[in-house]
Amino acid sequence: MPIYEYVCNSCGKKFSQLVLSLEDKQDIRCPHCGSEDVKRVFSPFGSLGASSGSGGSCTSFG
């Protein structure tokens, strides 16, 4: 069950929404002002994934 981030084009507030099906995507409303004029935005949390190989975000200082 994906959680998407949206921004309201009416009031400018950002919010997250759990989307259970494609039908739910059609009924997204801003929880702050109730507008249906919302846009899905890039979520850095949603883009993180398992990485194979080197790298990673943890750094050890010693």
Image (cartoon, rainbow, N blue to C red):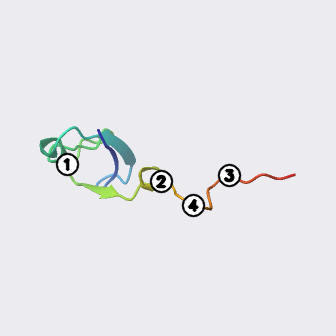
Q: CA distance from mark 4 to mark 2?
A: 15 Å
Mark carried by residue 36: 1
Asked whether 39 or 31 is in front, the reply is 39
Residue sticking out furthest to the left: 23
Decide which of tag 1 and tag 4 comes sooner along the chain: 1
Look at the numbered discs 1 and 3 and tell me whether their residues touch, using CB distance below 8 Å.
Answer: no
Amino acid of disc 4:
Gly
Residue on which disc 3 sits: 58
> Where does the N terminus fall, quadrant-wise?
top left
Residue at mark 4: 53
Q: Earlier in the sequence, mark 1 or mark 2?
A: 1
Give me the residue at 87% from left, 51% from top.
62
Look at discs 1 and 2 and give the one toward the viewer: 2
Whichever of callouts 4 and 2 sits on the residue coming sooner in the sequence is: 2
The amino acid beneath tag 3 is Cys
Element assignment for label 4: loop
Name the amino acid type tagged 2: Leu
Q: Which residue is mark 2?
A: 48
